[in-house]
Amino acid sequence: MNNIKLVIFDLDGTLVDAYPAITESFNHAMQKFGYESQAPLTIRRAVGKGDRYLLKPFVNRRDLDKVLIAYRRHHRKSLVKYSSLLAQAKKVLAYLKKRGYKLAVASNRPTEFSLILLKCLRIKKYFDYILCADKLKTGKPHPEILKKILRKFKLGPEQAVYVGDMDIDAQTGRRAGISTIIVTTGSSSKSEILAEKPAIIIGNINKLLRIL
């Protein structure tokens, strides 16, 4: 990976542990409209395609919009209170920035909430560009989010690497023609990740320093 100039990161499960915040907001919204609360693992396994898709399997279609509003209203506060950086994440970002890499975020989380996370965890300063699925027609695993980031920096896919935590991240990277590194700290199982054949699988984000 000697030709790499750009490192693109997913957020949740890759750099950030926001699962407690997601669980709090999810069950608050469920209870508010008379739906059953769900176990943290059930919620964790549903994460990845954005908040609307997170809620959709658990509520009636007619209620989805109002449950989503309640979820988002609660989530603005719960993200600040219950989110944390994964171990060594800030160290990795600081190292890559010092080495001269361009850094970007590609997340299915809406822009507003991605920015809340980046600001409250004090890592926004490391990123040159932030792109979220609500700014596109389709989110991951569609490759447009990565292709648009490449266009932003006027780079080819061979000059970038994408770092995520889920099987859909591996799918997205493959469809965009970008080498993808998957860290096993998110919501996909090892077998799900292996099935998508990413370039590299690592156990924690710190191991990225041995690759780049």
Image (cartoon, rainbow, N blue to C red):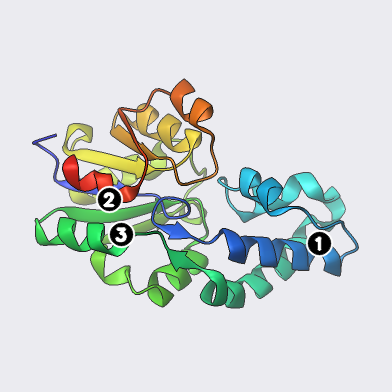
Dot label at residue 30: 1
Q: Quadrant of residue 154?
A: top left
The residue singled out by tag 3 in the image is: 88
Task: Describe residue 176's horizontal placement relative to residue 55 as left or right.
Answer: left
Callout 2–callout 3 Cβ contact below 8 Å: yes
Query: Which of the pair 62/161 is nearer the observer?
Result: 161
Q: Residue at x 30, y 59 (%)?
A: 88
Residue, disc 2:
206
Crowding around mark 2 (Cα neighbors within 10 Å: few <14, some 14 to 19, many 20+) is some
Q: Give the position of the N terminus as an image quadrant.
A: top left
- Mark 3 surroundings: few (<14), some (14-19) or many (≥20) residues within 10 A: some
Residue 14's spot in the image, x, y percent? Answer: 41, 50
Q: Residue 51: horizontal and vertical position, in percent?
A: 63, 55
- The reply, left or right, for residue 175 in relation to residue 32 is left
For the C terminus, which image quadrant?
top left
The answer to which of marks 1 and 3 sits earlier in the sequence is 1
The type of residue carrying mark 1 is: Met
Mark 2: secondary structure: helix
Q: Nearer the viewer, mark 1 or mark 3?
A: 3
Foreground label between 1 and 2: 2
Q: Residue at x 72, y 52 (%)?
A: 55
77 or 187, which is in the foreground?
187
Q: Amino acid at mark 2?
A: Asn
Looking at the image, tell me whether mark 2 or mark 3 is earlier in sequence order.
3
Residue 66, visible in the rendered structure? no
Q: Which badge, 1 or 2, comes first in the chain's sequence? A: 1
In this view, the residue in front, 14 or 34, is 14
Figure label count:
3
Determine the CA span between mark 1 and mark 3. 34 Å
Name the element at disc 1.
helix
